[in-house]
Image: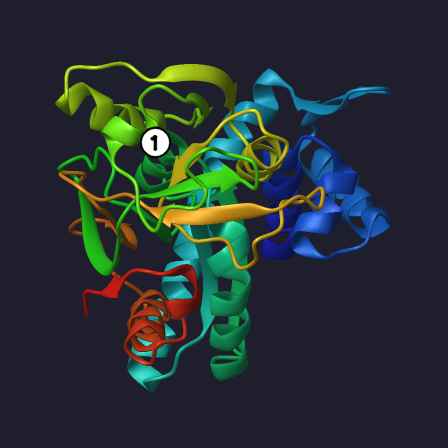
Amino acid sequence: MLRYTLRQIEYFVAVGEAGSIARASERINVSSPSISAAITQLEAEFGLPLFVRQHAQGLSLTQAGRQMMDQARIVLREAGALMDIAGDIAGSVRGPLTVGCLVTFAQLVLPSLRRGFEATYDDVKMRQHEMNQVELFSALRRSEIDVALTYDLGLPADLQFTPLLKLPPIALMGENHPLVGQDSVTIDDLLKHPMVLLDLPLSSDYFLSFFDEIGEKPVIAERTRDMAVMRSMVGNGFGYSIANVRPLSHTSPDGNYVKCVPITGPVRPMRMGLLTAQDVHRSNAVRAFIDYAIGMVRDGRLSQIGGLPLV
């Protein structure tokens, strides 16, 4: 007879992924004492220590905990599959849904998309993760997320992409940049000016490919992996940068002016869309989320970030 619950297993996985009870509490919106009690009960039931308690560094999985973690994820996926079957039979949209989003535009797109979806389907329990492109690929393959909102960057053949928006590249410039007064710029125009490179896996290769096409290299003055830091560095005059999603304001996070200038010429636009694993059963919740995102694009509710609808 089982003396542990799916909820306890869920808390265990949340702590294992977050690395601390406090971060897991924030992620799944459950009190820390409740999560701590669940972990203690699981360890007593299994007769194994699942975590090593490190006072200043949170929790780390023991060897036994790592093995149990792999199986716990399978248990939760199978439990989710039961909900999917029930939903299919009843024709309802319900159960868990975990969405990943590319970190560069998560702040501009995901909260409004999630809020609208949850208001429409209140029986869906949704979680979100912000990751870079390589992390999204890995999370989809390991079934840690059900669907990813991302760009068509380096897409592997075993994942399926549903395009939503075409987003041409733009240059971001501070108010004193020599090119800030122009209506558009070319890569040749940018070539001699310092660049703040958004240095994320695959994203940086995409931006640098513009210069490769003309047989040149940009003057990379600074690199950062954070979109907000990039905008602040641009606003403080460290150089221009390149992005595909248009910020919602002309102000950097630290209050400086940043202008978006279209890049013209032979530069490949990015496509934003939804990425899923191929040849897997899509739950009603996943299908509903994809349909909802397509509806948002068709209704113009993502027009604030720029781009042309592809659906």
Residue for point 72% across, 34% down = 43
Q: Residue at x 81, y 45 (%)?
A: 37
Q: Residues within 10 Å of mark 1 (few under 14, many from 20)?
A: many
Q: Can residue 49 be spotted in the picture?
A: no
Q: How is the image coloured?
A: rainbow
Location of residue 169 by image quarter: top left
**At 38% across and 83% down in the image, what residue appears?**
92
Secondary element under disc 1, as helix, strand or loop, is helix
Q: Is residue 126 visible?
A: yes
Residue identifier under label 1: 203
The image position of residue 9, as x and y in percent, is 60, 47
Asked whether 154 or 171 is in front, the reply is 171
Q: Nearer the viewer, residue 147 or 106?
A: 106
Type of residue at label 1? Ser
Quarter occupied by residue 144: top left
Residue 203, image x, y percentages = 34, 31
Residue drawn 37% across and 52% down?
Answer: 149
Horizontal side of 24 relative to 196 (left or right) equals right
